[in-house]
Amino acid sequence: MLMTAAATSQLWSQQVAPLPPPRQGYSFPAKQTLTYEVDWRVFTAATAVIHLEADGPNQRLTASADTLGAINLLFHVSDKFQGTFDRERGCTQEMDKQAVEGRRQVTSTLKMDYTQGKSVLEEKNLTTGQTKKLEAGIPNCVTDLLTGVFYASSQAMTVGQNFDIPVADPLKTVVVTMKVEGKEEVKTPAGTFKTIRVEPTADAGVVKNRGQIWIWYTDDDRHLPVQMRARSFWGTITFRLASVEAK
């Protein structure tokens, strides 16, 4: 017997802790553009640009990442992302991605239908022309992988006290534990910052598959992500803040 949407949503609600709302007094930036230098091993490999902007009750997040110089000869990457989430609760509404990674070219859209308790993924491979549409059950409020990095800024960060966020990844919900490990001073092209180091961990999904990940947030009310690092078998990739602008 197929489970109804309402029953699916209720089951997810029982299994997954809800997305914690933003801490009292926190507000997402009205307009903010963050530019990162991306280092792979010993090379400056790419540039990534993240833009956040208020849109009524929602927050829009757009991102792009493009490889540079000789890295393009080895493996060309040009990824673009657009996402929308609820400013009050943090729930992702929709995320769109256009990925050019080597010979792979894929566009995808993931929409959250909270009234029906499901997510809907539509994907097209531009190289082969193949398309697919898949659905999966979700709890009543989730974030997505990229938005989650910036949504975490809205949470209290106390060393030794972890918090969980449910992430759509993309056709299953994964609970990501944000381990608040310690404080460090971090130097980036944008300056030197006092930061709080956080390690996202999960038992499944992209977070687990990418090895160890750390994010350094500024130790202030903004919790600005000034550095991100992933360490895996293929090497270490580091995003270091190059500039932050209110535009």
Image (spheres, rainbow, N blue to C red):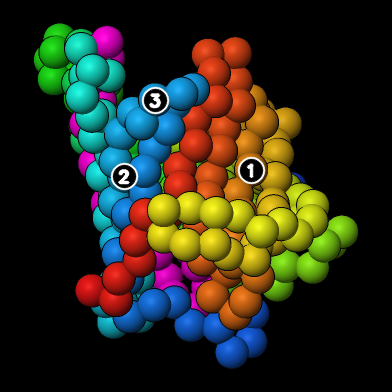
At label 2, which amino acid type do we have? Ala
**Residue 27, magenta (yes or no):** no
Query: Residue 122 — which label?
Result: none
How packed mark 3 is, by other alpha carbons closer than 10 Å (few <14, some 14-19, many 20 or more), is: few
Residue 50 image position (x, y, % from top left): 32, 55
Q: Which residues are magenta?
A: 74-92
Q: Nearer the viewer, residue 132 or 228?
A: 228
| Residue 186 picture location, percent across and down | 60, 55
Horizontal side, residue 150 vs residue 59: left or right: right
Q: Earlier in the sequence, mark 2 or mark 3?
A: 3
Please, what is the three-letter code of the amino acid marked with disc 1? Answer: Trp
Specify whether residue 88 is in view.
yes
* Residue 112 in the image: above or below residue 173: below
Q: At numbered mark 2, what does the secondary structure look like: helix, strand or loop? A: strand
> Do the residues bearing badges 3 and 1 touch, measured as CB atoms within 8 Å?
no
Report the front residue among 223 and 3.
223
In the image, residue 152 above or below residue 149 = below
In the visual, does 108 lie left or right of 172? left
